[in-house]
Amino acid sequence: MRRSGSSVGQLLDIVPGGDLAYIELSCRPNVQLASLVREFITQFYRRLFSSRNEVGFVALATHELLENAIRHSVDRETTIRIEVSRDGNSGRGLVSIRTWNRAQPSKIAALTSLIDEMNRVSDPQEFYQGVLKKFSAIDRDVGLGIARVRAEAFMSLFYELTGGGESNDESSVVCVTAMAEVSLGEGWYEGVLV
Amino acid sequence: MSLRQFGAETRYEGVLVAKFVGNADAATKPTLDSFLADLHDEARRLQVTRVVLDFTEFEFMSSAGFKSFVAYLTTLQEDSIYRVSVLSSDDMLWQRRSLHALKCFAPDLLDVDEVKSTKEAP
């Protein structure tokens, strides 16, 4: 398994054994369904988060990750799992969005290279503008959705690769995770959704 | 829970206004690309100095739609014919940061005006 992301451990330390709410969907969608899933998941966020801005940002990240997974899935099968957890002591919340899809080696290489590069830079906004300028110059897929998750939703991104094929030409399963701290609202009471 | 379909239309009443509604994503990108190309042609035909993009009912735009506007602004940067004013809404949670990014991409072309929500707070 290959993994990347410098702040994963720091974020996970927030909720050792804390309360957890989650939604997981496995589907064989097309890109049109990404908006429907986003709308559904947004209702979930509205019940849990106290900040409407955070609802918007995390919903945006959810859509971008799901649409990215759908577009690059070799067998059109995609899984998305959203977890919202709460540290029992501090009351701080943590949201994670994970997508899984099987993709071709060239697509995975482009994705992992992008996330690695993005995690190395100190200014995500400057990196984002660089991606915009790159797209305007070559008009090809340059990972704008992934960069948007970092720059606009302020979420940390990392990846894991599993289930690799026996040769370099065979597809692998890639899991992309976005995580961020959130403020939990009145919809959360001792781990039970009210 | 209902998802409003993407739509766009123009009107000209001394000012060329393009109004966007609903949700734009990868599925609607071809429609959006075509609309923006026609908008640019119309703006050139009318010889306007400013185009208004009305986003007040534009509920969501994924990066696919974002690419369409980047391509549109790139064309404008090459032609340098008119400026673009975006009318945004603070009800649409995605707009503030995304439009800020577009403004940074094309600072000499783009202005963003935010319309405050008239809805009562819950």
Image: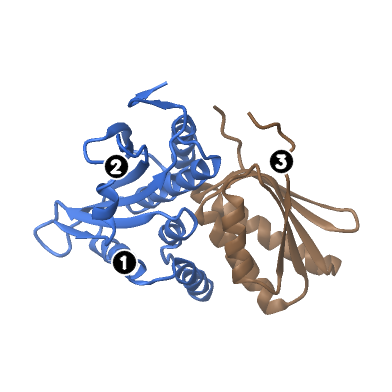
Chain colours: A blue, B brown
A182 to the left or right of B122: left
Q: Earlier in the sequence, mark 2 or mark 1?
A: 2
A17 to the left or right of B84: left
How far from the left and from the top, in percent, is residue A10?
A: 27, 54
Q: Quadrant of the rendered structure where residue B92 is? A: top right
Q: Amino acid at mark 3?
A: Ser
Determine whether label 1 and label 3 are within 8 Å by CB: no
Decide: few, some or many residues near mark 3? Use Cα within 10 Å; few <14, some 14-19, many ≥20.
Answer: few
The quadrant of the image that shows the C terminus of chain B is top right
Q: CA distance from mark 2 to mark 1?
A: 20 Å
Residue A63 visible? The answer is: yes
- Name the residue located 52 percent from the left edge and 48 percent from the top edge: B25
Q: Which residue is mark 3?
A: B117
Q: CA distance from mark 2 to mark 3?
A: 39 Å
- Name the residue located 60 percent from the left edge and 38 percent from the top edge: B5
* Residue A110: mark: 1
For the view shown, which residue lies furthest in the left direction? A166
Q: Chain of mark 3?
A: B
- Name the residue located 71 percent from the left edge and 33 percent from the top edge: B119
The secondary structure type at the circle numbered 3 is loop
Q: Which residue is mark 2?
A: A77
Q: Chain of mark 2?
A: A
Q: Quadrant of the rendered structure where residue B80 is? A: bottom right
Q: Chain of mark 1?
A: A
How far from the left and from the top, in percent, is residue B57?
A: 68, 43
Q: Nearer the viewer, residue A15 or A68?
A: A15
Q: From the viewer's perspective, is the residue at label 1 or at label 3 nearer?
A: 3
Q: How many marks?
A: 3
Q: Nearer the viewer, residue B78 or B57?
A: B57
Residue A103 visible? The answer is: no
How far from the left and from the top, in percent, is residue A132?
A: 51, 69
